[in-house]
Image: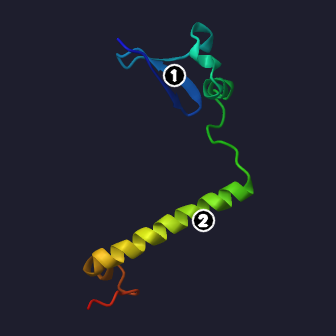
Amino acid sequence: MANRYYRRSGEILRDDGQEIWSIYNPKLRGWERTKRANEAYATAFQDPFHRISGEEALKSIAERQQRRDKWEERYKREHPDEWNKYHPDNPVQID
């Protein structure tokens, strides 16, 4: 019966293999000495979102938009009929 550790909504939980969840106490094991585990345990029951600066947020938004634009261009190339079906205001010319 293997234990698995998860972080759900900020707290550290332990699954005993039978889907019985309990809050994990890091004093019981050695793995809590890692930086990630210490951070997770310190923020238990708090806001699970990581604090980032405005600059990091804008960079992340720009990266997501670039990925979306690349996907959109590829979709237009590979499936022009589908694109035109769902985007009648912005049709792709089919040769």
Residue 88 falls in image quadrant: bottom left
Q: Quadrant of residue 24?
A: top right
Q: Where is residue 56 in the image (x, y as percent from the top left)?
A: 69, 55
**Residue annotated with mark 2:** 62
Instruction: State which quadrant residue 82 falls in.
Output: bottom left
**77 to 18, vertically: above or below:** below
Q: Where is residue 2 in the image (x, y as percent from the top left)?
A: 38, 14
- Between residues 92 and 84, which one lies in front from this camera angle? 92
Q: Which amino acid is tagged 1?
A: Leu
Tell me, for residue 13, which label it has, or none.
Answer: 1
Q: Is residue 73 above or below residue 11?
A: below
- Judging from the image, what secondary structure is the residue with disc 2 in? helix
Q: Residue at x 63, y 42 (%)?
A: 49
From the viewer's perspective, is residue 4 above or below residue 77? above
Of circles 2 and 1, which is in front? 2
At label 2, the amino acid type is Ala
In space, the residues marked 2 and 1 are separated at their CA atoms by: 34 Å
Q: Which disc, if any, is residue 30?
A: none
Mark 1 crowdedness (10 Å alpha carbons): few <14, some 14-19, many ≥20: many
Label whose residue precedes the other's in the sequence (2 or 1): 1
Residue drawn at x 34%, y 86% as measured from the top left: 92
Residue located 61% across and 24% down the image:
37
Helix or strand or loop: what does disc 1 sit on? strand
